[in-house]
């Protein structure tokens, strides 16, 4: 394993004589740099999507898993009594940290996005809501529902499971989509670099024949192509990753725009994640060019 790593590093070390067999300019150089830069730019957004989806899934899971809502529907003359009874019952339930009945202003604020600020909530038969916060391992939902049915007939417990699970599943699928996108970007980059390397090898077929006549081995000749295309891919992807990071930085934050995934961005140490994209591009270019060079050189034998 160490010998293989040393051989790869020696291949990238550089040799001025071998480098002359690779055209320093031309469409192959421009194609490699442009493809690497464009793919790195897209990879930054795919990476941001994956990290944002992961953070979103964790936040939804943690926020919704620790809270529940108790909804009480009863005649107006019994509503306050049932709310008080439900709060007393919840305060004596193991696993419940706190239970608080929402006042009318809070409930109106919850309904305002759908019905507007002028909803006459005092004249409508709207159920009363009680916010339940869990602690430790949480409460026994089945046992709590049985107690509520016996003591507070108008109470319905919603532990947010039907809301939490689809939201977390959707965020997990977005994270999987970002991983697949990065894999497709890497595959497309490898394909384009392979085509560019094949074109460069074909254009220098006569030079390669002369180098073989003076004793150059195929691994020595391939090293020149691998080295040049790896450096091109690294440089182009570094520019693309920097441009993509700046574009992500200019996106509106969730605090400003609100809504789903408007906070698509990096946070904390994840801002260093785009720095891995040029390294990944260099590895992809190295493997793709080496495979293409050795295969083409065998065909030219």
Image (cartoon, rainbow, N blue to C red):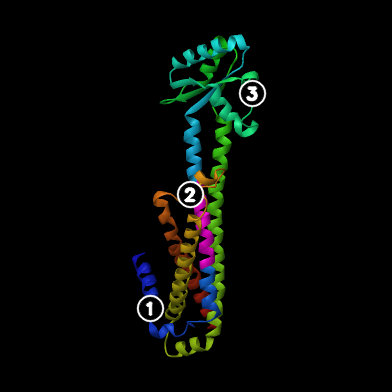
Q: Residue 170's spot in the image, x, y percent?
A: 57, 42
Asked if residue 110 is positioned above or below residue 273 in the image, the reply reads above
Q: Position of residue 7 (x, y in %)?
A: 37, 72
Residue 72: within the magenta?
no
Write the residue at 49% across / 63% down: 243
Residue at the front extreme of this rendering: 118
Taking 73 as reference, is 3 left or right? left
* Image position, residue 25 (x, y; %): 50, 82
| Residue under pointer 3 | 120
- Image side of residue 249 versus residue 149, left or right: left
- Residue interval drawn in magenta: 37-53
Of marks 2 and 1, which one's residue comes earlier in the chain? 1
In which quadrant of the rendered image does the N terminus lie?
bottom left
Q: Is residue 289 above or below residue 257?
A: below
Q: Earlier in the sequence, mark 3 or mark 1?
A: 1
| Main SS class of the magenta portion in the image | helix
Residue 14 badge: 1
Between 241 and 220, the residue placed more toward the observer is: 241
Name which residue lies at 50% across and 63% down: 40
Label 2, on which residue?
51
Dot 1: few (<14), some (14–19), or many (≥20) neighbours within 10 Å?
Answer: some
Between the residue at mark 2 and the residue at mark 1, the CA separation in whole angstroms equals 37 Å
SS state under label 3: loop
Q: Nearer the viewer, mark 2 or mark 1?
A: 2
Q: Nearer the viewer, residue 117 or 275?
A: 117
In the rendered view, tell whether residue 242 sits above or below residue 27. above
Callouts 2 and 1 close, C-beta under 8 Å: no
Residue at 56% over, 51% down: 177
């Amino acid at each position: 394993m160490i010998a293989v790593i040393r051989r790869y590093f020696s291949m990238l070390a550089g040799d001025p004589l071998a480098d002359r067999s690779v055209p320093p300019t031309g469409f192959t150089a421009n194609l490699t740099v442009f493809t690497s830069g464009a793919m790195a730019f897209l990879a930054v957004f795919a990476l941001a999507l994956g990290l944002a989806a992961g953070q979103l899934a964790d936040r939804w899971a943690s926020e919704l898993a620790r809270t529940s809502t108790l909804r009480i529907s009863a005649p107006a003359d019994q509503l306050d009594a049932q709310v008080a009874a439900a709060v007393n019952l919840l305060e004596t339930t193991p696993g419940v940290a706190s239970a608080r009945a929402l006042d009318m202003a809070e409930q109106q604020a919850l309904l305002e996005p759908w019905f507007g600020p002028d909803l006459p909530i005092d004249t409508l038969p709207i159920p009363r809501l009680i916010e339940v916060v869990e602690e430790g391992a949480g409460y026994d939902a089945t046992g709590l529902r049985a107690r509520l049915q016996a003591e507070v007939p108008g109470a319905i417990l919603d532990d947010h499971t039907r809301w939490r699970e689809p939201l977390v599943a959707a965020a997990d699928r977005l994270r999987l989509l970002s991983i697949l996108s990065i894999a497709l970007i890497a595959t497309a980059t490898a394909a384009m670099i392979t085509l560019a390397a094949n074109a460069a090898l074909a254009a220098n077929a006569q030079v390669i024949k002369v180098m073989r006549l003076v004793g150059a081995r195929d691994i020595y000749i391939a090293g020149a192509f691998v080295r040049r295309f790896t450096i091109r891919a690294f440089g182009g992807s570094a520019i693309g990753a920097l441009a993509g990071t700046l574009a992500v930085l200019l996106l509106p934050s969730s605090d400003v725009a609100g809504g789903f995934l408007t906070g698509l961005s990096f946070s904390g140490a994840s801002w260093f994640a785009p720095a891995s994209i040029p390294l990944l591009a260099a590895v992809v270019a190295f493997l793709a060019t080496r495979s293409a060079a050795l295969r083409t050189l065998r065909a030219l034998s």
